[in-house]
Image (cartoon, coloured by chain):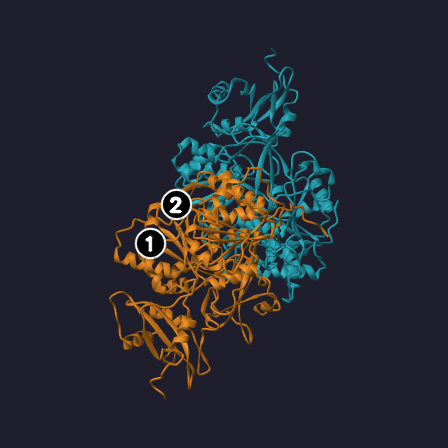
Chain colours: A cyan, B orange
Amino acid sequence: MIQATMMNFPLTLNHILERVVQLYPQTEVVSRLPDHTLHRYTYADFYHRSRQLAESLQLAGLKRGDRVATLMWNHYAHLEAYFGIAASGGVTHTLNLRLHPNDISYIVQHAQDRFLIVDDVLLPFVKQIVTQVQFERIFVVPLSGLPIPEGFESYEDLLATATGDFAYPEISEDDAVAMCYTSGTTGRPKGVVYSHRAMVLHSFAITNVDTFAISSRDVVTAVVPMFHANGWGVPYAAVMAGAKQVLPGPHLDPQSLLNLFEAEQVTFAAGVPTIWLGIAQLLEKEPQRFNLQRIRMAVGGSAVPEGLIRTFDRFHLEVIHAWGMTETTPTATVSRLKPHMAFATDKERYQTRAKQGMAVPFVEMRAVNEDGVVPCDGETMGELQVRGPWITGSYYGDETLQNNFTADGWFQTGDVVNIDSEGYMKIVDRTKDLIKSGGEWISSVDIEGALMDHPDVLEASVVGVTHPKWQERPIAAVVFKEGRQVSKEELLQFLSERFPKWWLPDDFVFVAEIPRTSAGKFYKKALREQFKDWQWDHQE
Amino acid sequence: MIQATMMNFPLTLNHILERVVQLYPQTEVVSRLPDHTLHRYTYADFYHRSRQLAESLQLAGLKRGDRVATLMWNHYAHLEAYFGIAASGGVTHTLNLRLHPNDISYIVQHAQDRFLIVDDVLLPFVKQIVTQVQFERIFVVPLSGLPIPEGFESYEDLLATATGDFAYPEISEDDAVAMCYTSGTTGRPKGVVYSHRAMVLHSFAITNVDTFAISSRDVVTAVVPMFHANGWGVPYAAVMAGAKQVLPGPHLDPQSLLNLFEAEQVTFAAGVPTIWLGIAQLLEKEPQRFNLQRIRMAVGGSAVPEGLIRTFDRFHLEVIHAWGMTETTPTATVSRLKPHMAFATDKERYQTRAKQGMAVPFVEMRAVNEDGVVPCDGETMGELQVRGPWITGSYYGDETLQNNFTADGWFQTGDVVNIDSEGYMKIVDRTKDLIKSGGEWISSVDIEGALMDHPDVLEASVVGVTHPKWQERPIAAVVFKEGRQVSKEELLQFLSERFPKWWLPDDFVFVAEIPRTSAGKFYKKALREQFKDWQWDHQE
């Protein structure tokens, strides 16, 4: 058989690192530090220090495939870790600083992390876990200006051990380069190990015009923490594109972010809906205060209410709804309108944009129920299954989790979805959050979205609560906007315009806030726990 | 060592074919036929017929890796061949219909092509080669409406043998999917065999925002023939993006093209400078006649004179200068301005856009002379060497050609270039076209470009001619624009503003046209032959 004559050239992050210094050495990386000041340097500086990190880690004994944990906010040193650890042949293991210390300890032990790089402002957190785990060495990034405490080493001192005599180790594109544990709401955290190849292909997919269209002309901000699924791959993609990066550090409140967007002329940002919800509120209150560029805002992590997309359009900010998971590197789908949809009604366009969207190139998806693959009719529900070169095929070091994958090689996401005839996927619910009422299914996500479209409602979460007759019935927890209030009757009336009667919540609970997971998703387990002994008013 | 947990999902054209029917079934493919009428169908039709082709080829006995030759203009059936032969597991071997029949015969034999798919209007050409080669079967695409002659089979009859019961064969992303022979001006044609992986990665690279930014919103025309280096990969990339395609068929004169661009609202086109030169002349003559969209025009194959870029800017048409070879799939560099260059002078911006540009992501380049890799100072010349996942690492079936590759794995392009501090590469000349005068080098390309900037000059080609004292001296062949004429003295004066005296041509020959290769490049071998017994006027 004829053989292709193409070179065997691996897809690695090392190429991306070398490229950026050749083509964009003067482009800036701007980081906001804990004291609110800005740290600025160029990709030339970034390149130099990333290679220093790579060499110094090798001098410290790091071997190909060894894990280096990071416990950091989004800033220059975390970006150096992303590329420097990769360049050394090591694996960057991002730790989620919002997890419980016990979970972190479990993760560190399970991944067998050798070293830790940590922000000095996060040292109190480290002190809670070092009683349970043993890192060989801990390198502290001096961000606050305070001296490094006894018993820890400085990240800057580590870098200073580099001689400049560095050469990349021989690696394959299938080599591990990063890992992340899911912060799911049930069970033990599960580890996903990314390859160089996955990171590179993911970077191509998200810089694509029909995905996020990231280019050298952009000023890019990953608001999403770099410890969440690779900061959605945005930091990698921005380096590949040679885009200026603005990293927000620990200050993620609406005012800090808007000041940063304004000062650095940000044109692309990525983050969860909660972040944008706060920003929308501030913009509504003070529409003239911030002088922003037009910003493309990639939003994911949970469903974006249609109303939020409309609100942002009023401020000339474009919400791009996307979907992914830790297991999918993460970007798998994106909701951008097709050219012919320019002629659709306003309502149809927003409905489509509020879906999770079309699979990006080289991701394949299908929805499956007990009868097999469901038709793409925009109605029939099934569990979402995906596959592709940046989708995980297993969990690290745990064969018992192979039941998350089908026999024919698809990842079972645990999301219940429908897919319409245009190929747009809509998440109806998590499998475990679907409300089973009298043998039928009710989507908690749909009711939540509708409630959040009410002008006086800030947030809403809906859970199924055990019911003596119907198996489960929905109860809604609702947070009002500041100074606003509405009656249960009005909310019921509002919802009844959209849903059949049997979908309407049996009751509403008005609360100050809704518990969230470390990834910013509604923590429904806590709500279910709270409502588990619910006294049903109307026993029929 | 830790293993990445990512799926083993191959990068193949089959994914792209399946994707386009799921997401863009109603988007059109428009082909201009030999009688100037338009053939229109959708990607759903294209998908259906491509799979019919795949199945019918398998039924005809095609095995994985077998070659199917095509001898076709750019139209729907050639696009079906691109994807249908790939889907069957076969290899599409595009034949260059502008080559001499003897060369085609050599190529067909060397590649061991089993089948041929050919346009009915090109059958006279086939009759010249079938005396020398034996295809097992020849399938004729009925474009002209005339009956298929005795002794040939209809492509439509082939497709009709498909039952619809088709499944993709198991393939690897490294499998061969297409091949093309270089139409170089010296030596035997050399074969390059592309893999699925190379085609997919090349599609990602050229759809990239900083390359050609091809998206689902575009209307894309490959003016460059699909038998030249995969139509520069544009047909593949357009299907991946779900962009409408407009295929021009055999009519490539300026008026036919401009009518097509206008009628179909083309937004992106790719072709060689000769094509654009003719279009520029027509637009200059009748600036109000065509109502065009803003078109991004990828131009490559030979250097684009700065003046041509300026001319097009006046018509709101954006020239994107790119460079590549059959050996590079082909796109390797692209000249787009970096954001900070918005502040450069008009002159600087055009000078940069007239360079061949920066390496696209995952292509690496360097210039090498006898002292090693030359500095990126925009002056020092060296031979361009490239590597990357879509660069060939050998020639098909010819080990003697391995001297085209360095010991450390780079492809030696045979182009002499400089690279500036911003990373923009500029082709100074082909190694063999450089003029060696008195121990120094003169760039024939630079003088040609300068001559073509003269308002009365249409085209110019400069070659080195053997000289008794200086080894070689430049002689320029010049074609004037219609109705224009200038003296040798004026041309010398014009050039002397840009070049040292010893670079100036010793003489000018005014001709009606300059001989070209089948790829549209100046055929300098013919000029050198014509000038070889030059009578030097001024023997010093």
What quarter of the picture does the N terminus of chain A occupy? bottom right
| Residue furthest bottom as drawn | B540
Disc 2 from disc 1: Cα separation: 39 Å
Asked if residue A424 is positioned above or below residue B376 in the image, the reply reads: above
Q: Secondary structure at mark 1?
A: loop
In the image shown, does B136 or A206 lie closer to the viewer? Answer: B136
Q: Is residue A46 visible?
A: no
Q: Position of residue A74 (x, y in %)?
A: 57, 49
Q: Position of residue A299 (x, y in %)?
A: 51, 40
Q: Position of residue B105 (x, y in %)?
A: 51, 61
Disc 1 sits on a residue from what chain?
B
**Marks 2 and 1: CB-CB under 8 Å?**
no
- Mark 2 surroundings within 10 Å by alpha-carbon count, few (fewer than 14), some (14 through 19), many (20 or more): few
Both labels 2 and 1 in a single chain = yes
The amino acid at mark 2 is: Gly
| Residue furthest left as drawn | B483
In the image shown, does A28 or A16 lie closer to the viewer? Answer: A16
The image quadrant that residue A437 belongs to is: top right
Q: Position of residue A153 (x, y in %)?
A: 68, 56
Q: Which residue was labeled with disc 2?
A: B145
From the viewer's perspective, is A371 left or right of B280? Answer: right
Q: Earlier in the sequence, mark 2 or mark 1?
A: 2
- Mark 1 surroundings within 10 Å by alpha-carbon count, few (fewer than 14), some (14 through 19), many (20 or more): some
From the viewer's perspective, is A66 left or right of A497? Answer: right
Q: Which residue was labeled with disc 1?
A: B316
Q: Is residue A280 visible?
A: yes
Disc 2 sits on a residue from what chain?
B
From the viewer's perspective, is A492 left or right of B510? Answer: right
What quarter of the picture does the C terminus of chain A occupy? top right
From the viewer's perspective, is A400 left or right of B476? Answer: right
